[in-house]
Amino acid sequence: MFKPLMKAQKGFTLVEILIVVSLIAILAVVALITINPAEAQRRARDTQRIKDISSLQSIMEQYLSDNSSVTSLSVRSLGGTNACDNTGWVGVDLCAYANTLPTDPTNRTSVVAVTDAGGTTTAGAAYTLILNSQGQYRICTRMESRANVAKLTTDGEPNNFFEVFSYTGVSGC
């Protein structure tokens, strides 16, 4: 007598499916750890800050070349709009030199990088402008990304700020 032939099973077993799903989950976790989206966002905001400081430096250079008599001031951008109005961003009328004035990407207190072994602290992430009566200025900001800590010490001043300046004797930030 002939035995009936058994049909070959098609498809995956439950164990095989669980193994594949667990491997995909492990790869997804490794990818997220490698990419680190939060750090990527911090680096993007720092890049915007560096660009904004460069713009502010150009605006200040134009302002100072047109205005021989300036008064000392020290101001911070504290959020709000970047649109020009009658008072300007820093208490001097810079609106003749730019349609809009830069504001920090977060404009709030946030966790920022400091130079001590890549640590962080909570501080204001805003732009600060210090201008003395001789027409010398310093524009400062803080960085969020730990990847940018080296920029805090290689910009000419060893401190916790990224700054551009016309004269090293202008202190503050």
Image (cartoon, rainbow, N blue to C red):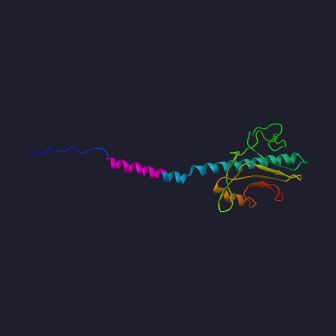
The residues colored magenta run 13-28
**Residue ranking furthest to the left:** 1
Q: In front: 162, or 172?
A: 172
Q: Count the marks: how many?
A: 0
* Residue 14 drawn in magenta: yes
Compare residues 67 and 78 and report the one nearer the observer.
78
- Which residue appears at 80% of the width and 46% of the height? 59
Residue 93 horizontal/vertical position (percent): 84, 41
Is residue 10 on the magenta stretch?
no
**Residue 107 left/right relative to 39:** right
Quadrant in the rendering for residue 8: top left
Image location of residue 40, percent across then percent down = 60, 50
Name which residue lies at 28% across and 44% down.
10
Q: Main secondary structure of the magenta part?
A: helix
Figure quadrant of the C terminus: bottom right
Residue 77, percent from left and from top: 76, 45
Q: Position of residue 86 (x, y in %)?
A: 83, 37
Q: Residue at x 86, y 48 (%)?
A: 65
Image quadrant in which the N terminus is located: top left
